[in-house]
Image (cartoon, grey):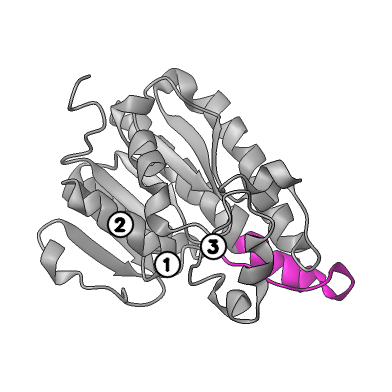
C-alpha cells in the first residue's frame, strides 16, 4: 500500500467550530499529520495551540454571519492560495419537545446547522473550482438525521436537511473534482452533548449501543483522514456512520 495514500501533509484545511469538542479534536488530528489548519469559532480554542503555531491560524467569528465567511475565504485565497479540505463541524443542538418548538427556535438551529454549513461549502467549492483543486468537503451530520428521539425533532431535522444537501452538492460539483461527503457520528461526549450526558442520558444510550460504550473522539480519526486525503478520491455523496452499531438497534 502506498504510504502516502492517507497523507494530508501541507493540505490547507478549514475546520469550523474548533474551540472545543470534536472540532478541536479534528483540528489537532490534521495538525499532527502535517496539514495547515485554519479554524473558526465564536471563542478562543480551549486547547493549546502554541505547539502548532506555524501551521494553525484561528479566527474569532460566527459562521452564520455571511460577512465573516466572505472575509474568511478572501483570507484563505490571499494567504494560502485557497483551501483543500473543509470540515463543516460547527453546529448546535436543542432538547425541546416539538410542541414547544416555535419558528424562532427552528430558525436559530437551521441558521447554523444548515444555512451556514451550506454557505461555507458553497464558497469552498467555488474556490476549489477556481483553483482547479480536487478538494474535499466533509459535512458533519449525525445518526439522528435518520432517526428520532423525543426532544430532538428540530436537531434531527436540521441534520437530515444537511445530509440531503450533501448529496445535492456532491452531484452538482462532482465533474469539477470537488468531493462532498457526510461524516455521521453517533453518541460522543462533546461540548454539545456534555450537559445531557451529565443528566444520565449517557447511561441510557450505552444500553442501546451494541458496542456498549459511547464514542471517543479518536474513533473518528480514520474516517477524518480518509475523507480529507486522496484515499477517498472516488468517494462523493456518501455517508460514513461511526456509531458503535447504534443505528442497528433502530
Vertical position of residue 223 compared to residue 95: above or below: above
Q: Secondary structure at mark 1?
A: helix
Callout 2: 10 Å neighbours few (<14), some, many (20+)? many
Give the residue at mark 3: 91
Residue at point 50%, 45% (across, down):
139
Which of the 4 quarters of the picture holds residue 47? bottom left
Give the residue at mark 2: 27
Question: Does the magenta run of residues contain 108?
Answer: yes
Residue at point 48%, 72% (across, down):
191
* Tag 1 and tag 3, C-beta contact below 8 Å: no
Q: State left or right for residue 159 relative to residue 213.
A: right
Give the residue at mark 1: 21
- Residue at the extreme left: 54
Callout 1: 10 Å neighbours few (<14), some, many (20+)? many
Marks 1 and 2 sit apart, C-alpha to C-alpha, by 10 Å
Q: State left or right for residue 199 relative to residue 84.
A: right
Question: Does the magenta run of residues contain 203?
Answer: no
Vertical position of residue 228 compared to residue 151: above or below: above
Callout 3: 10 Å neighbours few (<14), some, many (20+)? many
Q: Secondary structure at mark 3?
A: loop
* Tag 3 and tag 2, C-beta contact below 8 Å: no
Image quadrant occupied by the C terminus? top right
Q: Which residues are magenta?
A: 91-111
Which of the 4 quarters of the picture holds residue 218? bottom left
Q: Earlier in the sequence, mark 3 or mark 2?
A: 2
Q: Position of residue 130 (x, y in %)?
A: 33, 31
Q: Position of residue 36 (x, y in %)?
A: 19, 50
Amino acid at each position: 500500500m502506498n504510504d502516502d495514500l492517507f497523507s494530508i501533509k501541507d493540505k490547507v484545511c478549514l475546520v469550523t467550530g474548533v474551540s472545543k469538542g470534536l472540532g478541536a479534536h479534528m483540528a489537532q488530528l490534521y495538525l499532527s499529520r502535517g496539514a495547515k489548519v485554519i479554524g473558526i469559532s465564536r471563542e478562543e480554542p480551549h486547547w493549546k495551540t502554541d505547539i502548532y503555531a506555524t501551521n494553525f491560524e484561528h479566527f474569532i467569528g460566527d459562521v452564520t454571519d455571511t460577512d465573516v465567511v466572505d472575509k474568511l475565504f478572501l483570507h484563505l485565497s490571499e494567504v494560502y492560495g485557497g483551501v483543500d479540505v473543509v470540515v463543516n463541524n460547527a453546529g448546535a443542538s436543542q432538547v425541546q419537545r416539538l410542541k414547544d418548538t416555535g419558528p424562532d427556535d427552528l430558525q436559530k438551529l437551521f441558521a447554523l446547522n444548515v444555512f451556514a454549513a451550506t454557505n461555507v461549502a458553497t464558497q469552498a467549492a467555488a474556490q476549489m473550482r477556481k483553483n482547479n483543486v480536487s478538494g474535499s468537503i466533509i459535512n458533519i451530520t449525525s445518526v439522528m438525521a435518520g432517526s428520532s428521539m423525543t426532544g430532538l425533532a428540530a436537531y434531527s431535522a436540521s441534520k437530515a436537511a444537511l445530509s440531503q444537501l450533501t448529496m445535492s452538492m456532491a452531484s452538482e460539483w462532482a465533474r469539477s473534482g470537488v468531493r462532498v461527503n457526510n461524516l455521521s457520528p453517533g453518541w460522543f461526549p462533546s461540548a454539545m452533548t456534555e450537559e445531557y450526558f451529565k443528566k444520565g442520558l449517557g447511561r441510557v444510550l450505552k444500553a442501546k449501543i451494541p458496542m456498549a460504550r459511547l464514542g471517543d473522539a479518536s474513533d473518528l480519526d480514520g474516517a477524518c483522514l480518509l475523507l480529507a486525503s486522496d484515499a477517498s478520491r472516488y468517494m462523493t455523496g456518501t455517508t460514513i456512520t461511526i456509531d458503535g452499531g447504534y443505528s442497528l438497534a433502530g
